[in-house]
Image (spheres, rainbow, N blue to C red):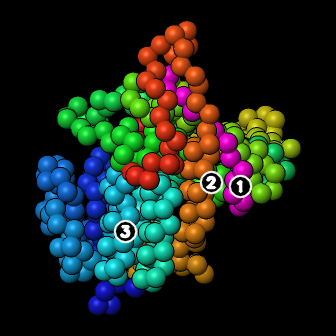
Amino acid sequence: MTRAGSDVVGWGVAGCGWVARDHALPALRATPGAEVVALHDRDADALARVGGDTPRGTDLAAFLATPGLDAVYVAVPNAAHRAVVEAAAGAGRAVLVEKPLAADVADAEALVAACREAGVLLGTAYDQRWHPAHARLRELLPELGTVTAVRVVYCCWLPADWTPDGAPHDNWRVDRARAGGGAAIDLAPHALDLVGVLLGEDVVELTALLQRRVHGYPVDDGALLAGRTAGGVLVDLHVAYNTPDALPRRRLEVVGTRGMAVAVDTMGQTAGGSLTLHRPEPVDVPFAGTAPFAAQFAAFTAAVGGTAAVDVAWPHDPDRDLRLHRLLLRALEDARWPTPTAACCPTCPPTPAPTAGTGSAGRRPAR
């Protein structure tokens, strides 16, 4: 419910990096029934780069005390999620937190528990749930027969000095202390979540192979993950920071006994890409043009405001998201790294400690 019975849900954004600035804030400002009432970031320069006259500041407590604030979108570095979410829950604010839930399992468990104990709504910002092509693909599943496999390629180019706009940029997504890992912890959560949303059953077994083949930073720049759902569907994920953006690098395939659905360039923040149904002749499938961020914020706003026209206002259980987070981090902790040799990996730094064992805290979805 909104504060003071208002018809408008007051939103605050904590963490004003490029994802919030370029995608979340434009979507929020265009969402009916939503108003952005406050911005927060510990970096005053990041706040200054956000346009508009929305009140803003570096003090978290003052941000959470903003009159009319009902919900907080959390887009700070992964290691800082817990502190912001716990503070927001303590202030009685609903929370939509970016994926991954946290940089490690302990922080993720703590922030989910904090929201449960405070009685506030918690959602994970898996924007790929909301891509219109993926929503249409879910409707097409019966035409595929018995689904046997899902394959995802979700890759991009992320060097250590990457910047979204050519300006100086703190690329924390390749900093193990703040991100909790590299490409796998950043990009694989989207794919794992999407498999469950599409099929209605989650991955319950998962193994991983990690690589640091191209970039010199001390986290993985690529990973292959293989898994199986509770019903026996095989899942194959390739995620990477070492694939040039000019190459084909975003593809989703769902294979069944009577057909196959292929989505190309849909794993991103816009509503673009294509969807093709093969039975076996290929047929292009149209889908709506609603951007994933817009659909996500509309749904969460309706849930907070009590206007959702469904039985369950926000159907995505945070405990389910937590189970997937545990599964991924356990797989990354047990993951096999290559043994560096002059022949295969001459620039590889020493193999790092396991991802999930750091106890400390990206988000760089493919552009």
- Mark 3 to mark 2 CA distance (whole Å): 22 Å
Q: Amino acid at mark 1?
A: Val
Sequence-wise, the earlier of marks 3 and 1 is 3
Q: Is residue 155 visible?
A: yes
Q: Is residue 101 above or below residue 153?
A: below
Q: Residue at x 75, y 48 (%)?
A: 228
Tell me: 93 left or right of 314.
left
Q: Nearer the viewer, residue 3 or 281?
A: 3
Tell me: 200 left or right of 88.
right
Image quarter hosting the N terminus:
bottom left
Q: Nearer the viewer, residue 89 or 199?
A: 89
Q: Residue at x 34, y 52 (%)?
A: 77
Q: Residue at x 46, y 26 (%)?
A: 350
Query: Secondary structure under badge 2?
Result: helix
Q: Nearer the viewer, residue 259 or 364?
A: 364
Q: Which quadrant of the structure image shows residue 263?
A: top right
Q: Residue at x 38, y 29 (%)?
A: 217
Q: Main secondary structure of the magenta part?
A: strand
**Where does the magenta region start and end?**
200-213
Q: Position of residue 97 (x, y in %)?
A: 41, 62
Q: Amino acid at mark 3?
A: Val
Q: Which residue is mark 2?
A: 327
Q: Amino acid at mark 2?
A: Leu
- Mark 2 to mark 1 CA distance (whole Å): 7 Å
Sequence-wise, the earlier of marks 3 and 2 is 3
Q: Which residue is mark 3?
A: 85
Q: Is residue 38 above or below residue 219?
A: below
